Amino acid sequence: MRDSYAIMRERNPLSSTPTRSSTPHPACRWHDKRSSPQEILDAFDQLPDPRKARGTRRALTSVLATAAAAAIAGATSVAAIAE
């Protein structure tokens, strides 16, 4: 399996390689296994929504899931995610 950063560099050779910590963040329980889509959605459901209720049209989980799918598909900016 190829490293996701290697794939990003192939698509955009000018991008810098993000630094990675040798130890995972303590809040990340899924650092060493693959998660099912349902597990990821459940994790998104547990996050508090920092947005004000007024004007909120979409559930935070659906916004995060859409952004994650766009990032996996290669989107590298907020504008690309919006497309």
Image: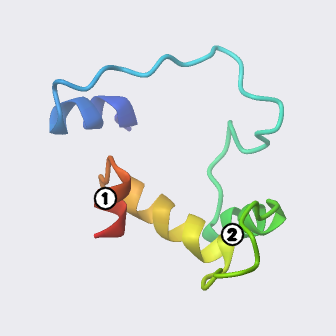
What kind of residue is marked 1?
Ala
Nearer to us of marks 2 and 1 is 1
User: Residue beneath label 2, please?
Assistant: 41
**Type of amino acid under label 2:** Leu
Q: List x then y, in percent, for residue 16.
A: 30, 20
Q: Residue furthest front?
A: 54
Location of residue 67 in the rendering, given as x and y in whole percent from the top left corner: 48, 62
**Image quarter hosting the N terminus:** top left
Horizontal placement of 75 versus 23: left or right? left
Q: Which residue does the image show at 36% across and 20% down from the upper left?
A: 17
| Residue 72 visible in the displayed image | no
Judging depth in this view, the residue of 28 and 82 nearest the camera is 82
Q: Is the C terminus in the top left, top right, bottom left or bottom right quadrant?
A: bottom left
Q: CA distance from mark 2 to mark 1?
A: 23 Å
Q: Is residue 74 left or right of residue 44?
A: left
Residue at (83%, 30%) from the top-left corner?
26
Expressed as whole percent of the image width and height from the top left, the position of residue 12 reads 17, 34
Is 63 placed left or right of 3 in the picture? right
Q: Secondary structure at mark 2?
A: helix
Secondary structure found at label 1: helix
| Residue 1 can be seen, yes or no | yes
- Dot 2 or dot 1: first in sequence order is 2
Residue denoted by label 1: 79
Q: Residue at x 68, y 37 (%)?
A: 31
